[in-house]
Image (tube, rainbow, N blue to C red):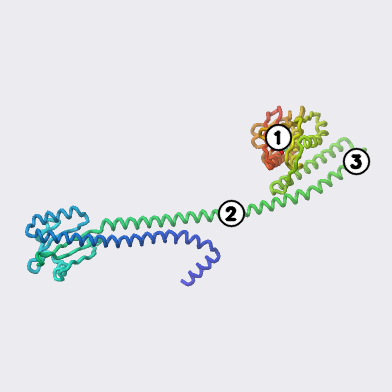
């Protein structure tokens, strides 16, 4: 026993939450059950007492008319039958007369008993002591039914002439109480099962919380690793590009045309690597909330003109037309200059990248009602299929088709763009027809 207690207390010390579980599973339902049990037991005692009073009252009534009608046995029998009918809890009701040393049944609830001799010791006791005897006894086959048995003498003109003997059953109330106790027991079992279920749920929940915590830590470590790795990668790639440029310059005159092409390819791959590293770095900063979003008042007209200008060489090289359409009045927003530039650069860069011929338009419109400015980047490029449009803003999504096979990219640009637009209070949309062109447009609140 001592050992069991020691193990139990050791366990509670290690897992104090177990106390809460034990209380919830066992003590709470048990307490509720015991509470109901004791209230019902008290109620039972009161019912017993009330029935005893009723029995004694009944005895005084019967004594009265037994004295009056002793001579007229028929009327007495009738009265007894009536009382039995009116009080269904009456088990038996007899009027007995002393004849010599015996007691003979004069009238009875059961007619067939009339004339029989009874040898019950209580009858002799009540007669000799000349007083009412009330006793709570068990009767029936299995001695299960409780009854109040009353034996009382009655007299005529002060002379003892007979005995009244009857019993009132407590069967109904006992059954009711038994049912109530059984219901309380059921409620307790249900309570225990329900608490058990709650505890299991709780344990699961604790498990989930623990797992989420761990996952968050892993995620943080992963972010940190990506941040470090991409940062560290930038310097060597810049070196490669620098040395490559140097080498190209020095060997300019001695290079064969194929070798020159190879140099170009190496340079393009290095450039793509730079883009990939820079995109991954931006994603990691966005996810780690390390990207600067401090705001200032920006002129949309000025920012767009400057951002688009950077694409002039590439546009010229691809023989495309690039135009800007701005409202006459200068438009102002409140945003971070570099984040706004990133949005425009990403969209225009895609338009240039995925347009083989034709034109690209950047349009700015102001909706004074909603106090928003709408910026669109429209191209006459390869377009995007309806299925791809659904997944366009997901991380690493690139549409796989023959037109895009040769075009380098990371699939991160649009995800970054959408994140930034939403972080500065806007929303981005796409409309496109395959083979005809695409329109990316977004709105931002005016300053
Ligand atoms: P990336 O261009 O580096 O692959 P993005 O996230 O910017 O990544 O774009 C995702 C995909 O959306 C691209 O791979 C391309 O298939 C498609 N896409 C984006 N912009 C355009 C556009 N203007 N025209 C056609 N397809 C586009």
Q: Secondary structure at mark 2?
A: helix
Query: Which residue is drawn at the image coordinates 50% and 70% (left, top)?
Result: 6
- Check contact, mark 1 vs mark 3: CB within 8 A: no
Q: CA distance from mark 1 to mark 3?
A: 47 Å
In this rendering, the label closer to the viewer, 3 or 2: 2
Query: On the picture, is 387 further left or further right than 45?
Result: right
| Circle 3 residue | 249
In the rendering, which numbered label is found on residue 373? 1
From the viewer's perspective, is residue 160 above or below residue 373? below
- Label 2 lies in ligand 1 vicinity (Cβ under 8 Å): no
Ligand 1 quarter of the rendering: top right
Mark closer to the chain start, 3 or 2: 2
Counting other residues with Cα less than 10 Å from the Cα at mark 2, is it few (<14), some (14-19), or many (20 or more)?
few
Q: Badges 2 and 1: C-beta atoms under 8 Å apart?
A: no
Residue closer to the observer: 259 or 300: 300
Question: Is tag 1's residue or tag 3's residue first in the polypeptide sequence?
Answer: 3
In the rendered image, residue 387, in percent from the top left (x then y), is placed at 64, 33
Question: What residue do we see at 84% from left, 44% from top?
Answer: 241
Taking depth in this image into account, of 306 and 348 the one nearest to the observer is 306
Q: Dividing the picture into quarters, in which one does residue 118 lie?
A: bottom left
Between the residue at mark 3 and the residue at mark 2, the CA separation in whole angstroms equals 60 Å
Q: Which residue is mark 2?
A: 209
What's the CA distance linking mark 2 and mark 1?
43 Å
Q: Secondary structure at mark 3?
A: helix
Check the picture and name the quadrant holding the C terminus. top right
Ligand 1 closer than 8 Å to label 3 CB: no
Q: Position of residue 238 (x, y in %)?
A: 82, 46
Q: Tag 3: Cα neighbours inside 10 Å, few (<14), some, or many (≥20)?
A: few
Q: Who's the residue at 69% across and 29% down the image? A: 434
* Relative horizontal placement of residue 250, taking residue 343 as reference (left or right): right
Where in the figure is residue 244, as x and y percent of width and height? Answer: 86, 43
Q: Residue placed farthest to the right in the image?
A: 253
């Amino acid at each position: 026993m001592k050992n069991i207690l020691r193990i139990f207390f050791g366990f509670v010390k290690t897992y104090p939450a177990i106390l809460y579980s034990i209380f919830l599973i066992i003590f709470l339902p048990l307490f509720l059950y015991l509470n109901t049990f004791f209230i019902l037991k008290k109620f039972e005692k009161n019912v017993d007492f009330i029935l005893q009073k009723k029995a004694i009252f009944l005895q005084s009534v019967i004594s009265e008319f037994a004295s009056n009608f002793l001579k007229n046995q028929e009327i007495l029998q009738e009265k007894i039958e009536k009382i039995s009918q009116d009080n269904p809890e009456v088990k038996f009701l007899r009027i007995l007369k002393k004849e010599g040393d015996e007691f003979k049944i004069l009238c009875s609830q059961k007619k067939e008993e009339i004339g029989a001799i009874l040898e019950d010791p209580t009858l002799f006791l009540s007669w000799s002591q000349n007083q009412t005897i009330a006793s709570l006894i068990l009767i029936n086959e299995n001695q299960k039914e409780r009854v109040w048995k009353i034996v009382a003498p009655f007299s005529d003109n002060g002379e003892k002439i007979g005995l009244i003997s009857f019993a009132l059953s407590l069967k109904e109330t006992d059954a009711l109480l038994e049912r109530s106790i059984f219901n309380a027991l059921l409620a307790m079992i249900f309570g225990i099962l329900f608490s058990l279920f709650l505890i299991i749920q709780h344990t699961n929940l604790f498990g989930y919380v623990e797992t989420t915590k761990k996952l968050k830590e892993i995620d943080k470590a992963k972010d940190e690793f990506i941040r470090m790795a991409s940062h560290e990668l930038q310097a060597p790639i810049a070196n490669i590009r620098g040395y490559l440029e140097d080498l190209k310059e020095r060997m300019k005159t001695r290079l064969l045309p194929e070798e020159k092409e190879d140099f170009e390819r190496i340079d393009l791959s290095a450039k793509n690597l730079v883009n990939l590293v820079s995109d991954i770095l931006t994603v990691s900063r966005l996810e780690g909330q390390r990207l600067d979003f401090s705001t200032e008042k920006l002129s949309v007209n000025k920012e767009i003109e400057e951002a688009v200008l950077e694409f002039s060489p590439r546009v010229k090289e691809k023989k495309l037309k690039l135009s800007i359409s701005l409202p006459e009045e200068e438009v102002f927003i409140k945003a971070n200059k570099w984040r706004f530039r990133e949005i425009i650069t990403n969209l225009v860069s895609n338009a240039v990248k995925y347009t083989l011929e034709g034109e690209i338009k950047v349009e700015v419109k102001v909706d004074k009602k909603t106090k928003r400015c709408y910026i669109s980047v429209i191209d006459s490029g390869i377009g995007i299929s309806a299925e791809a449009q659904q997944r366009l803003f997901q991380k690493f999504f690139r549409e796989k088709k023959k037109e895009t096979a040769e075009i380098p990219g990371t699939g991160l640009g649009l995800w970054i763009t959408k994140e930034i637009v939403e972080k500065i209070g806007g929303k981005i949309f796409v409309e496109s027809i395959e083979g005809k062109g695409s329109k990316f447009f977004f709105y931002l609140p005016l300053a």
